[in-house]
Image: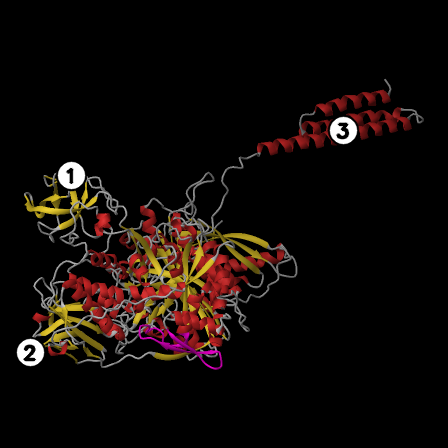
Amino acid sequence: MHVSMKWLKELVDVDLTVEELVDRLDMTGTAVESVRSVGEGMEGIVVGSVLVKEPHPDADKLSYCSVDVGAGEPLRIVCGATNFEAGDRVPVACVGATLPGGFTIKKTKLRGAVSEGMMCSAPELGLGGDAGGLLVLPPDTPVGMAFGEYLGQADTIIELEVTPNRPDCLSIAGVAREVAAITGKQATVPASVPAESGAPAHRAVSVEIADPDLCPRYTARLIRGVKIGPSPEWLTERVTASGARPVSNIVDITNLVMFELGQPLHAFDAATLAVRDGVAAVTVRRARNGERLTTLDGQERVLDSEMLVIADDSGAIALAGVMGGENTEVSGQTVDILLESACFEPTSTSRTSRSLGLISEASTRFERGVDPEGCVRAADRAAALMAEIAGGTVAPGVVDVYPMPAAPRELELRVSRMNAILGTDISATEAGRILAALGLGVETYNDGDTLRITVPTFRPDLEREIDFVEEVVRVWGMERVPVTLPAGRGRIGRLTAHQRWMRRIDATMRAAGLNETMTYSFVDSADLGRVRMTVPDDGLLVELVNPMSEEQAVMRTSLLPGLLRSVSYNQRRGVPDVHLYEIGTVFSTSPGRKLPREHGAVGGVMAGLWSRPGWTGDDHPLDFFDGKGVIEALAEDLSPRHFQVRPADLPWLQPGRSAEVLLDSKVAGWLGEVHPSVAAAFEADAPVVAFELDVEVLLSTARAVRTYTEVPRHPAVTLDVALVVDESVSVERVEQAIRKAGGVLLDTVRLFDVYRGLGVPEGSKSLAWALSYRVPDRTLTDEEVRPVHEKLLRKVCGAVGAELRS
Amino acid sequence: MSIIDELESLKAETLARIADAADLAVLDAVRVEVLGKKGSLTGVLRGLGALPAEDRPAVGKASNEVRTALEQALDERKALLADVALSARVAADAIDVTLPGRKRLPGRKHLINQITDEVVDIFTGLGYAVAEGPEAELDYYNFTALNHPPTHPARSATDTFYVRDLSEEVPGQTGPVTDVLLRTHTSPVQVRVMERQKPPVYVIVPGRVYRRDIADPSHLPQFHQIEGLAVDEGITFGDLKGTLDYVCKELFGKDRKTRFRPHFFPFTEPSAEVDVSCGICAGSGCRFCKYTGWQEILGCGMVDPNVFGYVDIDPEVHTGFAFGMGVERIAALRYDIPDLRMLVEGDMRFLRQF
């Protein structure tokens, strides 16, 4: 909502500076989005008269004009606009002038023709309105007048963010009332009583409302014998300041009254309406499915029965509350005006305007709610102005169909209740004074605590007691509410066990060297194929009905695609060492499901080195075992009863470097080196180590309670042994055999070398182990350990086909 | 020359050799040569037997004195040489302490989650529990039960992501296509919590939310919010002010001020937007706060009685407040991040900064 300070001050005595007023509005709930000055910085911009308009010799869409600016030779100006003719008065920016947008006019050549200035549109001059053409000024505007002078004294336009609950503030009168309430002044509402003469309106116009639920009130006035022409300066100025483009005196008057009183009006050319029995019969009805209407913007609209139209016997003539029709538009030849001042139902107007993608000043007001009680006042005001400005005669009477009369609401406010909600001690007198200033009727009950409030129809948002609490506190001052803290008993602030575990998992990932990242929850539906995965649990992808793009059309089923993109992002920018993890939600669904399944997942990717080679020697390229180290660190902290990494054939991982992670025999996820082809599909350079684990499984196997085991007090006897086994025998199998054969004396088993080469047969490997024997109560002797150790070796050799390496 | 003289001469000669010994090996050789079983002192004493008995005590005494003196000199010289050797070794071991250390740095938590955890920790300290809810939500929880009218613009398919519904149910009339959507705020968790828990309710709800904004320096189609909800007997707007004032000071600094500007939200009334005094100019106005001296930080208000109606809480008995803050917004304000897209790109050079 654009508010001209000049206009506002006519309706309310503002004795604050603009800055103070803006602050007061901000602090009472009407946010000010911008403040701008007009009529300043217009040096070098003058009123010009177009003497000659010819086609540009060398460009179809340009014209070449000669423009009198009141001094010196006429200027030669190349122009792209088409909405003007020779003889029109327009603003001209001469060479050297700087437009409000910062553009300085220079003498230039456009397609070979010299141009010595620029004819301007309203937006180019920092005024609101249409950029579609030049700002054509009234024909009596003096040529050569400084444009700033033409605009009148400088004005300040403040742009308000009107919240959806305040339709009344979409008018200067409403804003004036609000400003009066918050500054302790009185506001006046403009009203006019037109002088009426001639045959009564109802003899020439009839109105029928077929769908009263969508149109609580429709009024029509008839103004005969108007002369269409440009508006006087003051009217153009008001309309322009409010953000509209001056069109003609009649249209400008309807806009003026809409901006002034918040009531959208529509002027029909009465002669274009179909006549039945000598009467223009207007019907307000639902459109027929497939009915067509060409709106004022020249677009043909296909309507449906959800939309409300104004119709005559020939069909729809306007889209109710949204836009008029082209066929009944006021033109230069129009003589009689049928003036509509009506109230349309918000939801229906909103739906119509949205489904047609047609948002107008009128629809914006109707969809928030227009006061049906204001229809006649607005019609009277506009009719009087049409008589005054366009020389029309107002026909006696208003044709007024009002099937659903609005009545002021009667409600109560308990002052003690209000103070209990706010934590304040505002008196009934104070609350009553504030509400009365807002235009509400206020009476105090005998108990002194209850206010009986009459809500006028222009405040449809005030429906409940709580609404008055808000009105009082916002005007009284939220800053005055004392600051306290809740005194509530019986509350305990803590994280759940689940949430505490999530923090531990998070911490372990970082301790293991990974950095947390976040990727998009939505991915390309092709990503799943690209990463060679299927939806888990035989599910289906979760599809968005209205994605932003194909690349973000489905919800992710795995963190891997996003993480691979991050690997690529880093590598492409010269960052080869990537260590990332993400904890996030993955999605899947299945037939018959409404809400998708959501799972927490922990994923990681690692590429390059831990760090660039330093003076202490080279770091190793990250591989499977670096990923496994992270998983082992996690398992160490979660402490499941059983932890295993076993080979698995997973299509997105490189065969032979691909494994499943099992916790307490449940598959918790996977780990491996990403298949080089998959990495390439995401433009990432292999090798990339990756893993992904399911949070649910992690948490279900995590054990928070630990048991104490005695710290050894006696030294261990440690014996080393190298076992040569076939390549096909896994380390895990050998270790299990050792533990199984170890008996009570065996304490720890540590693999310290894997060797292939000289001295070890082809196809075999040598595994070097350090075996520690220990008992808790005494120091073991060599003599005790030796036989146990030898027996262990015999058993292990038998079990896994190992030979001792000498 | 008497034996005594011989002893004195040996003593003097040996002391000189000890003093001259350049290292422990030479010193040890001197010791063996003089004091060893076949050493020269022993050799001198071998002549003792030839002396008259009355002279023997004096010679014995003198020889002991010589031995003691030599042993002492040897020990002293040995300690000295050991010191010198150690000093030499230490000197040789000197390093350039400015060389970098050996390390594998721990990773960093994402900025958004650092801030989230910080806010959560402040609220657990104030007695709040942490609640969570689904990211794909029903229209009912996201809009209807939060008092959004059926035509609320946020429900449009241009603003909200809708999710394909695979149930056989006929979709409600509320959403444009389906009544399953990606939640547009963390507020639906308010309703879910109040459905299953009667007051007192004190919860904080961090989570990811989605809106159909094109990713640009100041927008992302997914971002993070932290919702707060307190419902109890006697909760006041003053409690809301006090709570948020405390939290803003914790988050931004003790010297920061807050102000509450009345606003409109469908699910709270009275509603307010909260500004924090600008951290760059301390309130005098600068380009960061668009010359207002304030930075908008969150929205809040008293829980609307209509919302209580959906969860069967009597607004005559219980009152409550709710608030929601954008974590990206806090991050952008605190660190002056020029482009929010950096938060989802995974650039190691960005992530390692926080």
Q: Measure the C-alpha gap from mark 3 to mark 1.
A: 107 Å
Residue A570: x and y in percent read 34, 48
> What residue type is disc 1 on?
Thr
> What residue type is disc 3 on?
Ala
Label 3 with label 1: CB-CB less than 8 Å: no
Q: Label for residue A278?
A: 2
Instruction: Give the letter of the chain under mark 1.
Output: A
Residue A771: x and y in percent read 54, 55
Identify the residue under disc 1: A108
Identify the residue under disc 3: B73
Q: What stretch is highlighted in magenta?
A: A440-466
Q: How crowded is mark 2: few (under 14 residues within 10 Å), some or many (20 or more)?
A: few
Q: Which residue lies furthest to the top in this view?
A: B1
Q: Nearer the viewer, residue A109 or B233?
A: A109
Q: In which quarter of the image is residue A173?
A: bottom left
In terms of sequence position, does the residue under pointer 1 or pointer 2 come before the other? Answer: 1
- Labels 3, 1: one chain: no
Identified at 9% across, 51% down, the residue is: A85
Instruction: Give the letter of the chain under mark 2.
Output: A
Q: Quadrant of residue A171?
A: bottom left
